[in-house]
Every structure is written in structure tokens, then in C-alpha cells.
Image: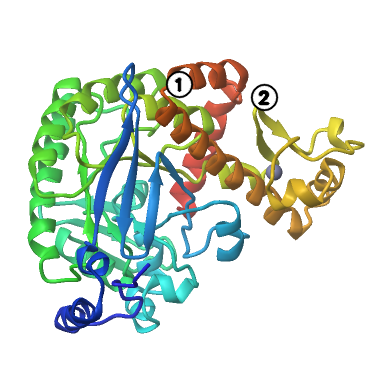
Amino acid sequence: MVELAVSDLITDSQFHQRKESLRGNGTKQEYMIPFFSFAIDAECPGTWARAGTIHTPHGTIRTPIFMPVGTQATVKSVSPEELRAAGAQIILSNTYHLMLRPGSELIAAFGGLHSFMHWDGPIMTDSGGFQVFSLGHLCKLSEEGTAFKSHLDGSPHLLTPESVMRIESELGADIILPLDICAPYPYTPVAAKETMERTHRWAVRALVAKEEYRPEQTLFGIVHGAFEAELRRESAHFVGDLPFPGLSIGGLSVGEPKQLMWEMLHEVTPALPREKPRHLLGVGSPEDFVVGVGLGMDMFDCALPTRVARHGGLFTPGGRVNIKSARFRTEHGPIEEGCACYTCRNYTAAYVHHLARAEELLYFRLGTIHNIRFMLRLASQLRESIIAGTYPAFRDEFIARYKPSSEKVREEQREKWKTARSHIV
Ligand SMILES: [Zn+2]
């Protein structure tokens, strides 16, 4: 495709000049390429699942899609080439981490994230709000923004809706998010309403501030409202009516029972505009991906598939297995029969088991590649089932077959990660 987008940092007027020159020389198709578009290719008649196509300046994304998380401008342990080979179409990176280290100005000086990290596909950046919120006592909220101390060196910082637009323009992702407030769980209804209303005011400020920066970046709005059905609907209407080309659903998967998260999506989705893509922030275990698609979500991001891989948890159609367990010690077959990932094509489960037990560096790469491939294959299967009109059966069969880790294990892991996050983020 024509690279309308720029991987280096240029001013708006330079960008328009470049775009105009493309128009002059280009074909009709080039002329028509917008910075961002979303088209619905198919909808499931029995659920809210849909298959769509998103165009961004760095490429096309077929939805539903899972976005691997590259917190520090890298999906841990794998190269961009390996990500591509595993089927990744778009990745998500974290503004909070990158603004502190190495700094958004430095990344801008290297031509933005795409060029800095050598990933030429679409990128989304979050706003940093969630990570700042998880700093707890190190974070102070006001109408102006969020003041916090760096987890790296204790230095003070202030994020405002306006400064986040500047930082994200320096990072240069294709899709960016505005500063929001993630209400904690548990919460009080009064606090939920106050934080939602402030997030709405910040959304409007972000839209105004964005005008100063790069037009080729697309700003999504974020729907909040904690776990209050009425607030969720209100937020969906308010944010959905603003001129955001896409919407993220925030503030879910923050420690609440799973059922509560699904109940909130039941409330939110019917209140969202049909024509805008919907991103479920921070959710992306295999089973949540499959269920979330049926509740109308198009895009998912989550560090879980790559994080559990590094700890030995690998996905198979029958559920998550622990590659370190003794049953793999003499396994001649791959981790997953029929998986076309680099790991399964070339290595026995016994070898991967050995690497994991010995904590060899190659294990992190092989385990991560497999889980990313699993998630992206699942994305393709979901899309195909929606187009074929068989999504409900696919979902039911997947859920019946796939055994996630038990709720108790999940709780323990969640607590452990929350504690770890509050210290090292
Ligand atoms: Zn595999």
C-alpha cells in the first residue's frame, strides 16, 4: 500500500504537502486512502459479533483482532519479524513507560515508535492513565490532570489531557488514547460518577488539544462508568456522540468478578454507535477474547498471553498447560499438534519443557511465539466463523473445550500481578 503515513516526525504542513504530492501523482485508489476507516464486513445475526476491516496509515487490520502488548517498545523476547510471522497485525505500547524511559522526545528524534522499534505495522498507544492509577499513593488527581511520581526515580510528573496528546504525537502511534481515570474496584457509586464525569471533560479537552498535532493519528474515546449500569450507558452515549472515530471500553478487568465485566458489556454495547470500532482495554485471555467478541467488541489487548508464556503457561485448544510439568519431559510431539508457529514446527514439547525448566533465554522466545500465534489464529477463526454465520457454535465449542486456569489460580495471579505492578508497574 501507499505509505501516506510518515514514520518520521514532520510538521502538519509538511505532511499535507506530502499528501498533496501523492494526490497529484497517484491513482484514484491512493487519492481515496483516508487516515483511518472502519468497515463492517459481516455481522452475526444471533449475537453482537461482527467482522470488520480497519485501515490505518501503517496497514490494514482485520477484526476481531488481538493486539500483543509491547510495553517498553518491544513485545518481550520477540523481534518484529517474529511478531509478523506469528500473525500480529497491530501492537499496543504503553505511553507511561515510554515517556519516562527513554522519553517521548528521544523517540520522536528517532522518527517515532515505528522507526525506533523497527515495527512498520499499526501501533496503538494507551494514555498512561491506567499505569498512573495503579501507582496508588504516588498519584494525585485534580481537574487539571494526574500528578504522579516516577516508579523509576521518584521524579514528579503531571499528565494532563493536553500533555498526553503531545506525548502521544511524539510517540507517533496510529491509534492513540486520551487521558482517563480508571475507577478502582471496589468503588463507591459517587466516586464512580465523579471520575466518569471528569474523564468526559478530559475527553473533550483531548479532542481540542489533538487538533494541534498529527492529523494522521486517530484518537479513540474511552467509555467509563465503573460497574454502574446506568453510568456505563451514559458514558457510552456521551463518548460515542463525540467525534472519536473509535471507542475503547475502559475500567474493566480491574479485579472484579468476571460475570460483572460481561454484565457491563451487556449494558454498554447497545448504547455504542454501530459504525465505530470497539476496543476492550486490557482484556485478552483466550476465553475472554472469544466471549467478548460475541458482546460486540472488535479489538482486544492484554499482556496476559505473553506474560503467562514467560512463566510456562502455554495455550492449546484444550486449555492452558504448564510446559514445566513432568508430563512434557518425554513428549516427542510439539506443544500443540497442528500449530504452524515457528516453535511447534521446529521443536518438540520435551525440548521446550527442558528450556523452560532450565530457564534458558530461548524458552521465553519460543513460548511467547506460540501464545501469540495461538491468539492470532483464534482471531482468524473468530472472523471466519462470523463471516460464515457460525460464531455462536464456534464460541460454545471453544468454551466447552478450553479449560482456563481455575478462578482461584486466576485470583492469586491477579493479586500477585497487582502487587508487582504497584511496585514496578
Ligand atoms: Zn505453536
Residue behind mark 2: 318
Secondary structure of the residue carrying tag 2 is: loop
Where residue 165 sits: x, y (%)? 20, 64
* Up/down of 29 relative to 91, above or below: below
Q: Circle 2: is it few (<14), some (14-19), or many (20+) Cα within 10 Å?
A: some
Instruction: From the viewer's side, name the closer residue of 320 and 23.
Output: 23
- Dividing the image into four equal quarters, which quarter contains ligand 1? top right
The answer to whether 335 appears left or right of 131 in the picture is: right
**Is 154 rendered above or below residue 36?**
below
Q: Residue furthest front?
A: 27
Q: What's the residue at 20%, 23% (across, down)?
A: 228
The reply to whether callout 2 and callout 1 are in contact (CB within 8 Å) is no
User: How is the model colour-coded?
Assistant: rainbow
Decide: is 375 above or below 187: below
Tell me the CA gap for discs 2 and 1.
20 Å
Sooner in the amino-acid sequence: mark 2 or mark 1: 2
Return the residue at label 1.
Answer: 390
